[in-house]
Amino acid sequence: MSSGGHNRIHEPKRQSTGTLLHPFMKPWFVTKLRDYLKAAGLASDQFAGHSFRIGAATTAAQVGIEDSMIQTLDRWHSAAFLCYIRTPHDRLAALSVSLAK
């Protein structure tokens, strides 16, 4: 691989059956994701690889998975994963109403 080759985007290789011979690389996936989002009329520049980390951490927290398990599943070695968990706006609004009583 030449200098800077790690930035090139390679189509994943497949067997004749369609099975992937190796996992696809993140740059390829993010590029394809943005292409599909753009084709769907969505703001593709608002999505990146971290969008999936945010989604996974948020979903796991919403279904009650323990913080330590979320940290382990996403291979975080610190409490930084807590920054990825998003609280839905309707839940924040309900909390605000509850506190105002």
Image: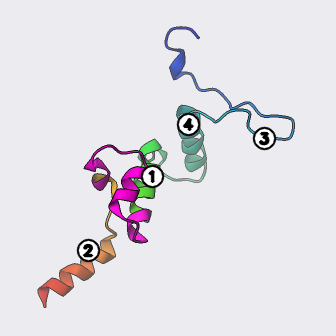
**Mark 3: few/some/many CA within 10 Å (<14, 14-19, 20+):** few
Mark 3 and mark 1 lie on one chain; the one further toward the N terminus is 3
Classify mark 1: helix, strand or loop. helix
Disc 2 target residue: 92
Residue at x 13%, y 91% (from the top left corner): 101
Res. 23 visible in picture: yes
Q: Nearer the viewer, mark 4 or mark 2?
A: 2
Q: Is residue 70 magenta?
A: yes
Which of the two residues, 71 or 20, is positioned nearer the viewer here?
71
Q: Is residue 55 magenta?
A: no
Classify mark 2: helix, strand or loop. helix
Give me the C-alpha separation between circle 3 and circle 4.
21 Å
**Mark 2: few/some/many CA within 10 Å (<14, 14-19, 20+):** few
> Magenta stretch: dominant SS?
helix
In the picture, measured across the screen, residue 40 lies left or right of residue 69, that is right
Residue 73, labelled with which disc? 1
Disc 4 target residue: 31
Mark 1 and mark 2 lie on one chain; the one further toward the N terminus is 1
Kind of residue at disc 4: Thr
